[in-house]
Amino acid sequence: MKPSELVNFIKENIIVNEKLNRPTTLNVIGESGIGKTSIVRQVFKELNYTIHEPPIVYLSESSELLGLYKEKDGYTENISMRWITEIKEKSLILLDDIWRANDLIQQSLMSFILEQRLGFNYLPKYCHIVCTNNPLDSLYNVQDIDKAQLKRMENVELDFDVKDWIKYEQLEEFETFLTQHEQMILDITPRSLSNFFRKFKLTSDYNYIKYLCLANTNEIFTERFLKYLDKQLPYYYTSEELLKMDINELSKTIKKMKSVDYEYYLIKEILKINLTDNNLNKYKELIKLFNENQKDYLEANLSSINKIKLSLL
């Protein structure tokens, strides 16, 4: 399924399982870096769940997961690990890369998933368990899994969809370039590219952009992206510059660029304009440069204050 489909699936699954008074036990499988863990975190964070992520890959003994036992007054007492005792109602236990954990840890965790408890500690109400894993093939250093254990969870496979990823990362202004390099994105991993673009948006230092791109991607992608950028940069006007520009000149530039990416860039800059009495008319002229769908996007993303001002024109 696509990332957007996974988001909807998790949300609906939580609703259904809570109606049934049972926890979600979900296993999300997908290639490295395509957003499995970040999507799960995002969904549960939006729903105001407390998220617990025990470092299962780094544990070597089951006691590090379950806690220790000691004799006290003739009885055996369990000393639980802190993260277990901190689990409250409406929590997510996120088991990242469970298939990379050693056999002892995996066995303990699979019992945890099945019985909803670790040692003497049962999960409170409205707690959910989600595992994220790479595929069981030779490309990844994962342990062999008993198929019977897999059946204890609901298993979904996350596929990379470049357009869905572009929308998720708000990279519409680079859509044409990125869709042309989909396979290269997979080779680099979407996670690395996401890191690059988040930093790229915060700088205008060309030399820094070059080495930032190299640090997160590879030489071929960097070379192609910089060539693409060189063609775009002279026409990347800021919101302040757009207010001062001649509308006819801007219209010619849009036609010259012939790029949906460029139009989306302009739209984002236009949305930054603070609609004062002095620039309301200019804003209205700028809107006329775009098609109906883009106009709808512009109007839908306006702040409520700006919408009121625009309606007075």
Image: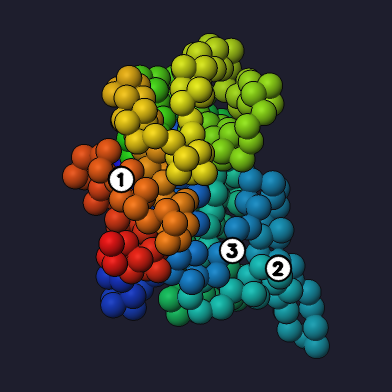
Q: Nearer the viewer, residue 293 or 146?
A: 293
Q: Earlier in the sequence, mark 2 or mark 3?
A: 3
Q: Which element type, helix, strand or loop, lies under badge 1?
A: helix
Which quadrant is the C terminus positioned in? bottom left
Which residue is at a point 37% across and 31% down the rendered structure image?
A: 250
Pointer 2: what residue?
81
Pointer 3: what residue?
52
Where is residue 299 drawn, in percent x and y? Answer: 29, 56
Which residue is at a point 48% across and 30% down the rendered structure image?
A: 236
- Total labels: the figure holds 3
Which quadrant is the N terminus positioned in? top left
Q: In this rendering, does residue 193 appear at all?
A: yes
306 vs 143: above or below: below
Where is residue 310 drawn, in percent x and y? Answer: 32, 62
202 vs 308: above or below: above
Neighbour class for label 3 at 10 Å: few (<14), some, many (≥20)? some
Neighbour class for label 2 at 10 Å: few (<14), some, many (≥20)? some
Where is residue 267 drawn, in percent x and y? Answer: 37, 43
Structural distance between the alpha carbons of marks 2 and 3: 12 Å
